[in-house]
Amino acid sequence: MGASVLQSSDGAKLGGPEVRIHLCQCSPGSQGLHGETRRESEKTNPNLPILTRECPNLQPELWNHHTFGKEKNVSWYSFSPDQATRSLENILRGKA
């Protein structure tokens, strides 16, 4: 499977074949991230595979799986949807 070519909201090309979002259904730290962040990411990156895992007592995090098994993650605890979208773009650009 080849790496997807992704695009940020400002048109920059991004890399990374997969993104995983970990959220808690009831934690205050995950509030506001459930639907909005995913919808915004799918609008900006329609070819990006986004896997969302929601379970109780899970720390909200973003994981990006690159080629050759390399992974990066960012804690999303108490992030607003805008902050989460910016961190997604940053991690895909390799800035996180």
Image (cartoon, rainbow, N blue to C red):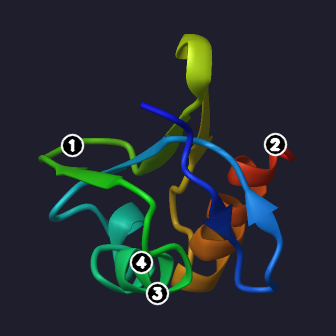
Residue pointed to by mark 3:
43
Which corner quadrant holds the N terminus?
Answer: top left
Marks 3 and 2 close (CB-CB < 8 Å): no
How crowded is the residue under tag 3: few (<14 C-alpha within 10 Å), some, or many (20+)? few
Estimate the spatial distance between the alpha carbons at disc 1 and disc 2, rounded to whole Å.
Answer: 28 Å
| Residue 57 sits above or below residue 87 on the image | above
Give how far across and how far down residue 73 sits, in percent: 59, 36
55 with respect to 80 (left or right): left
Amino acid type, label 1: Asn
Amino acid type, label 4: Glu
Estimate the spatial distance between the alpha carbons at disc 2 and disc 4, rounded to whole Å.
Answer: 19 Å
How crowded is the residue under tag 4: few (<14 C-alpha within 10 Å), some, or many (20+)? some
Which corner quadrant holds the C terminus?
Answer: top right
Q: Earlier in the sequence, mark 2 or mark 4?
A: 4
Give how far across and how far down residue 78 sits, in percent: 52, 66
Give how far across and how far down residue 81 sits, in percent: 52, 81
Of badges 1 and 3, the one in the foreground is 3
Estimate the spatial distance between the alpha carbons at disc 4 and disc 1, rounded to whole Å.
Answer: 26 Å
Residue at 56% across, 39% down: 3
Estimate the spatial distance between the alpha carbons at disc 1 and disc 3, rounded to whole Å.
Answer: 29 Å
Amino acid type, label 2: Gly
Residue pointed to by mark 2:
94
**At numbered mark 4, what does the secondary structure look like: helix, strand or loop?**
helix
Of badges 1 and 2, the one in the foreground is 2
Q: Which mark is residue 57?
A: 1
How crowded is the residue under tag 2: few (<14 C-alpha within 10 Å), some, or many (20+)? few
Q: Which mark is residue 32?
A: none
How crowded is the residue under tag 1: few (<14 C-alpha within 10 Å), some, or many (20+)? few
Marks 4 and 3 close (CB-CB < 8 Å): yes
Residue pointed to by mark 4:
42
Question: Foreground: 26 or 8?
Answer: 8
Residue at 37% across, 74% down: 38
